[in-house]
Image (spheres, grey):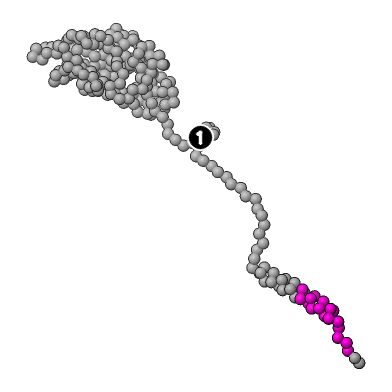
Amino acid sequence: MTFHSPPACRLARKRSRRSRRGKIMAILAGGAVLGLGTTATVAAWTDTEWVFGGASGTGDNAGVGTSSFEVEQNVVIPFDTAAFVQDETNPGQALTFGLDALSLTPGDSVYAPVALRTVTNSVAGNLMLEPAVAATGVTVVDSGAALWSALTLQVWASETAFTCNASTVASTTTPVITKIVDGALSTTGGAAAQALSAASANTQHYCFKVTLPSNAQTNQSLNLQGRTVAPAWEFSAVSS
């Protein structure tokens, strides 16, 4: 029997098929090896939530902060809203005692009013009248502080507006006025604090009375004539 070798082209095709089959098997085997010990991942929805510090009922304007406490004063009768101002350093606004305040004789008194309240966005608080000190920047003539030491002070307070004069403060029928100061000008402050409501809800009215006592010149060696003083008062305000 005689054997004939297959044509060269048929052998080439067989070799090509065997090569492709070997590569596919190798790829599949490699994939199986690489897949060992791995976990498949899938896409997921995500979300975030945020919060911030705020206050109940204030909506978008909420936040964390501090309150405000501010007092304003008015020395101009009839204490219209437009005349209230803030003056926080000595000497402050001038109380209007009048021209007679420069020509006192023993036994004379002069009067001046002032009103105080909180501003519209302020919390509530309390006022305490401190003893007088010398007004800053005001030139006086009072060697040895003789006139300063001789003068006396009385102050009345009320939430109700009242006329600041001798007849009103002497009247027993004047409603709701309280004497809070009665003593030497140089050392006497308020005996009690006055309450201020928040946001200008009330006004405290004060009446200052400065007196040169009738016995001020009993010591003839001490001449009080031609002297001047300029007392300044601080209202210490504290929120409540």
Which residue is painted at 84% across and 78% down in the image?
A: 9
Q: According to the image, label 1 marks what residue?
A: 62
- Residue drawn where x is 29% and y is 19% of the image: 180
Q: Secondary structure at mark 1?
A: loop
The one nearer the camera, 204 or 21, is 21
Instruction: Please tell me which residue is depicted at 19% across the width and 17% down the height of the picture.
Output: 140
Give percent across and percent down for residue 236: 31, 26
Amino acid type assigned to the residue bearing label 1 in the image: Ala
Q: Is residue 6 on the magenta stretch?
A: yes
Give the side of residue 84 with respect to residue 40, left or right.
Answer: left
Residue positioned most to the left = 221
Q: Percent from the top left, x then y, of residue 150? A: 17, 16
Between 219 and 29, which is closer to the camera in this rendering? 29
Q: Is residue 178 visible?
A: no
Q: Is residue 196 magenta?
A: no
What residue is drawn where x is 24% and y is 14%?
210
Nearer to the camera, 35 or 174: 35
Q: Main secondary structure of the magenta part?
A: helix
Left or right of 200? Residue 6 is right
Residue 12 placement, left or right of 159: right
State which region is magenta: 3-20
